[in-house]
Amino acid sequence: MPAVSLTHLKKQIELLRWKYTQPKEYVIQLRNLLDTYSDHTYRAAASAPESSRQIEAYHVPPVVVRQIELSLYALVNENPTPAFNLANVLWKEDKEEPRLLATYLLGLLPPSEFEHTLQTIEEWAFSEKDRELLEALFERGTVNLRRHAIQRWLAKIQDWASGISIPSKKLSLMALLPLLSDREFENLPQVFDLCTPLFQSSPKALNHELSQVLITLAERTPAEVVYYIRQLVGSAASEDLRRLIRRCLPAFPAEVRERIRPVLQRSTPPG
């Protein structure tokens, strides 16, 4: 991996800045920059999660991407109008770093662009198969939505949760996770209401996402989760739901485990 001279890198990014209003030219120059710092010898271990991913990466030092992000942050603050077009062009790239920059740009867009932002997030999410990119889209691409239009974002998540298809429901649960990790977000009752039908139907195809949400909620608000699980289990819970909760037990905080285990034992049907 090439050594990074911060002074030289900033000069290269300064030249990149001039292409901000010309998305195609920006991306061409960005490719050249990333390729300069790419680790061409990188090989993921066969046991590493990334080894099974379909998308390739440049594997540049983190400081390179961070400096590009800082440059984009300043540019969007000065002139947000070109950012949306640039994000769309970056998302069409075939390597990870430009696509992550696309999600970062979406998260910077101001309220005047929120309708475009919501539409774009939905389009990208429903067409993307790479889980890590989806997680980045919901984490990074919704930063300003979460700050300035949380109800509009929650309404979109509710639409997905109420959808017929499993992919739609799965995306709704993935989209909730950054909210639950955001300590500034306090409308947890709405999250519980949104999730209840998904837990009650408890399709096995959603087990991973439902487990993630339940574990994150248990870490965020233990007392409320204990009450919530008691309500779920007490309303004729399926064996699939009880099994899902039991599998989550080791990841729950100790205080939640101790209070939930007896509830599950009492609710288990005989035989």
Image: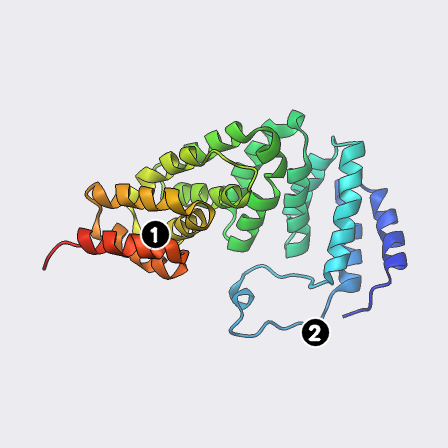
Viewer-closest of 7 and 147: 147
Q: Quadrant of residue 139?
A: top right
Q: Residue at x 38, y 45 (%)?
A: 223
Viewer-closest of 56 and 73: 73
Residue 169 shows in this picture? yes
Query: Is label 2 or label 1 in front?
Result: 1
Q: Position of residue 69 (x, y in %)?
A: 74, 48
Q: State the separation of the CA atoms marked 2 and 1.
A: 37 Å
Q: With respect to residue 158, does 28 lie above or below?
A: below
Quadrant of the drawing holding the N terminus: bottom right
Q: Residue at x 14, y 54 (%)?
A: 269
Question: Which residue is tagged 1?
Answer: 205
Q: Position of residue 163 (x, y in %)?
A: 37, 35
Question: How many C-alpha atoms fall within 10 Å of the one at disc 1: few (<14), some, or many (≥20)?
Answer: few
**Number of the label disc, if any, that sits on residue 241:** none
Q: With respect to residue 4, does 71 lie above or below?
A: above
Question: Which residue is tagged 2?
Answer: 41
Question: How many C-alpha atoms fall within 10 Å of the one at disc 2: few (<14), some, or many (≥20)?
Answer: few
Residue 201 shows in this picture? no
Q: Is residue 242 left or right of residue 270?
A: right
Q: Is residue 174 left or right of residue 92?
A: left
Task: Say whether marks 2 and 1 touch (CB < 8 Å).
Answer: no
Q: Is residue 61 left or right of residue 11?
A: left
Q: Amino acid type of disc 2?
A: Thr
Q: Amino acid type of disc 1?
A: Ala
